[in-house]
Every structure is written in structure tokens, then in C-alpha cells.
Image (cartoon, grey):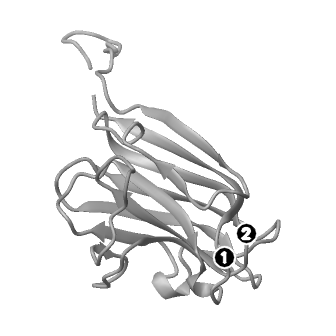
């Protein structure tokens, strides 16, 4: 700000809020069927959450990485048809990436933004990233079936969300067992005060 008659700016101390915190970082091993963040991670201290996926690889080809929300801190996960991945689809999950591979260079890098999940309104999420899938194709985030670009999900249930589970699904792999092989998922929160 400039005071009357001043010739230089008068810098003021910024108020609270607006800072990003690293809340948690989870390394994935080849024994992990899922990665869960609980109510100790997703709290009312933050309005926006950002999950960063680094070098995430599944243990078999053509797995899809999906997620489900929890309203009880991660004890159980919400299914049903409340996840709207595109248009007016009604799914029991949100998509992160489709057709992931199992080889060293068939990894997923990306992010999931989660907006004000602890409010008792519909929960909004956005996915973006790059997936080099099992057949060597490079897809933007969720592949050609779900917009071939940024993917958005609205969980149409007015319940507070305080947990999330990421997991590979074998529905694209002809019934092969699905699991993770390696990678890291980091969770950041944008402070609200």
C-alpha cells in the first residue's frame, strides 16, 4: 500500500491462509492393492487438496487407476452411482488413468485436485496428467474414453468427505489381478486460515 505523501510502498505483513503444506507422502510398493489417505490427512484446516502422482506403475498391463471417497475417515468407501465422471455418467468411482502398463517406462505422472471436500455439499475433483499405457500410447490423464484431457468428477452426495482410496482396477485387463507395483503419491493442502 502507499501512505499519503509516501514515495515508496509500505509493505504489510500478509494475513494467514493461502500457504501450501505437504500433508503426507506415501511410497507405493508391489504389495499395495490400494493407497489410502484418511481423516488425519483430509481435515477442515484446508479448503483445497492436491494429490501428486509420481512414477506410478501397476503390476499388470491394462489396469485403470481409480479412486473412491470416504465419509468415515477411511473405514469404508462410498460406492453407488454418485460419481459423475463425464457428462451425466453414473459410476461408483472416479478415474485417474486408464490402461496403465506394468513396465518400467509405462508410468503415470499427474495430479488430482479436490475442492472443499469436508463441506456438506457435492464434492468436486479434477484430474490431469500423462499416462504412457501398456501398448505404448501416450494419453492425457484418463485416456480417450473420458475426455482425452482433464477429467472432472462431481460426487453428487451432500456428505463431508474425509478420506480417499486410490486403487488399480482390472476391468480393462481381462480379469487379471490388479495391484500397484511402485510410485509415490504426495498430498498437499492449501490452508484456509
State the residue in front, 111 or 67: 67
Please name the residue shown 55% across and 65% down the image: 167
Indicate which disc residue 47 carries: none
Q: Earlier in the sequence, mark 2 or mark 1?
A: 2
Q: Residue furthest right?
A: 104
Say the numbered circle drawn on residue 59.
2
Percent position (x, y) of residue 94? Answer: 42, 70
Give whichever of 13, 17 is nearer the camera: 17
Left or right of residue 85: residue 156? left
Residue that appears at 27% across and 73% down: 82
> Dot 1: what SS?
loop
Q: Note whether 1 is above or below 126 in the view shown.
A: above
* Residue on which disc 1 sits: 177
Q: Residue at x 56, y 84 (%)?
A: 171
What residue occupies the far top of the structure in this picture? 5
Q: Position of residue 187 (x, y in %)?
A: 50, 44
Q: Position of residue 6 (x, y in %)?
A: 27, 10
**Element at badge 2?**
loop
C-beta proximity under 8 Å, tags 2 and 1: yes
Quadrant containing the C terminus in the rendered view: top left
Tell how many labels: 2
Task: Assign the N terminus to one quadrant of the image.
Answer: top left
- Quadrant of the image occupied by residue 190: top left
Would residue 48 appear left or right of 109 to someone viewing this image? Answer: left
Crowding at mark 2 (Cα within 10 Å: few <14, some 14-19, many 20+): many
Q: Where is residue 91, by image quadrant?
A: bottom left
* Disc number lying in front (2 or 1): 1
Q: Residue 116: x, y in percent? A: 28, 49
Amino acid at each position: 500500500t502507499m501512505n499519503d505523501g509516501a514515495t515508496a510502498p509500505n509493505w504489510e505483513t500478509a494475513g494467514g491462509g493461502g500457504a501450501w503444506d505437504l500433508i503426507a507422502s506415501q511410497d507405493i510398493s508391489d504389495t499395495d492393492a490400494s493407497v489410502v489417505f484418511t481423516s488425519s490427512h483430509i481435515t477442515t484446516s484446508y479448503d483445497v487438496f492436491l494429490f501428486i502422482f509420481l512414477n506410478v506403475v501397476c503390476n499388470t498391463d491394462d489396469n485403470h487407476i481409480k479412486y473412491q471417497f470416504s465419509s468415515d475417515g477411511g473405514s469404508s468407501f462410498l460406492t453407488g452411482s454418485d460419481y459423475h465422471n463425464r457428462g451425466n455418467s453414473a459410476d461408483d468411482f472416479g478415474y485417474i488413468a486408464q490402461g496403465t502398463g506394468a513396465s518400467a517406462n509405462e508410468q503415470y505422472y499427474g495430479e488430482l485436485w479436490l475442492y472443499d471436500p469436508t463441506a456438506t455439499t457435492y464434492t468436486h475433483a479434477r484430474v490431469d496428467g500423462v499416462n504412457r499405457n501398456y501398448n505404448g500410447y501416450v494419453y492425457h490423464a484418463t485416456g480417450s474414453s473420458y475426455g482425452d484431457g482433464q477429467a472432472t468428477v462431481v460426487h453428487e452426495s451432500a456428505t463431508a468427505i474425509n478420506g480417499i482410496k486410490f486403487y488399480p482396477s482390472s476391468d480393462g485387463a481381462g480379469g487379471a489381478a490388479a495391484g500397484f507395483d511402485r510410485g509415490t503419491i504426495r498430498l498437499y493442502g492449501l490452508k484456509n486460515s
